[in-house]
Image (cartoon, rainbow, N blue to C red):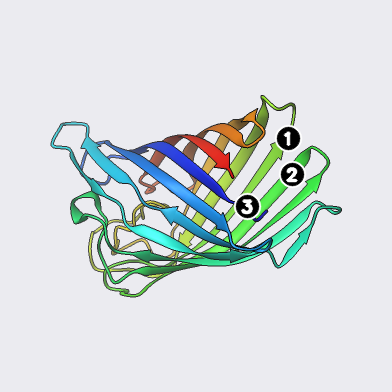
Amino acid sequence: MIQSEVRPLFMFHRLDSGLLGQDVDVKLYAVQLRYAVTERLALIATKDGYIEVDPANGGGTDGWADIAAGLKYALIQSEEKQFVLTPGFTFEIPTGNRKVFQGNGQGELNVFVSAMKGWNNLHATVSVGGRIPMDFDRETANIRYSGMLDYWVCNWFIPFVTVNAFTTVTDADVLGLESEGFDLINFGSTGASGHTQAAFGVGFRSRLLTNLDLGFAYERGWISKNDLFKDRFTVDLIWRF
């Protein structure tokens, strides 16, 4: 649905030892924004914030994430049929700090289309998209696909399950890895092309007020033995205005 909202979030992301020879914790403090220009068109800011990278053996660092913003449009929006079809795009500007694996390349275009269908209290959401770097030597390109099922038990408990996956389709020249950084980091891996990475997630939302939701999610990586994605916890608030 097209609506105006502010979404502060905290993400605790654990990476496997294949990155620095040891497990690495990544923490993100961010705010996503969506502003409904019309009933069908919205401005969206999907990536920003501050990142902390903490290897298990010490020597952590921190810095700013890149900034990504764009537009989405409700091509089909039917309350009667509980169906919404929304294409959109964002452009990621390499404004972040390289010490936290940001700020590399010349930017990245992210195009997507998502659809949501409801059957009373049950809802299914699917999304397909692609990330296209402006500099293929510094960042890899990938195709993304995801799905979510949620069920409105009551205002206080709206459980959901998710699957988020992507397939890397090009190699870059930055790090000798066979995995990429999922949705937060583009390492510019040299050997990730053709590899599919995925995470299965569970969580719930609570409708605290008419215009305020609290959410929690846990995701765990699977499919690829070379996947750096170990698991991730996310806590967020959504304030609609």
Q: Is residue 105 above or below residue 205?
A: below
- For image coordinates 27% across by 40% down, the residue present is 17
Q: Which residue does the numbered mark 3 point to in the structure image?
A: 3
Q: Which residue does the numbered mark 2 point to in the structure image?
A: 123
Q: Is residue 52 above or below residue 170?
A: above
In space, the residues marked 2 and 3 are separated at their CA atoms by 18 Å
On screen, residue 193 versus residue 85, left or right, reads left
Q: Earlier in the sequence, mark 2 or mark 1?
A: 2
Q: Is residue 145 above or below residue 139?
A: above
Give amino acid for label 2.
His
Q: Residue furthest right?
A: 80
Q: Quadrant of residue 42?
A: bottom right
Q: Earlier in the sequence, mark 1 or mark 3?
A: 3
Q: Which residue does the numbered mark 1 point to in the structure image?
A: 151
The answer to whether marks 2 and 1 mark residues whose Cβ atoms lie closer than 8 Å is yes
The answer to whether marks 2 and 3 mark residues whose Cβ atoms lie closer than 8 Å is no
Is residue 80 visible in the rendered structure shown here? yes
Residue 162, image x and y in percent?
60, 42
In space, the residues marked 1 and 3 are separated at their CA atoms by 21 Å
Q: Is residue 212 above or below residue 18?
A: above
- For image coordinates 47% across by 37% down, the residue present is 220
Q: Earlier in the sequence, mark 2 or mark 3?
A: 3
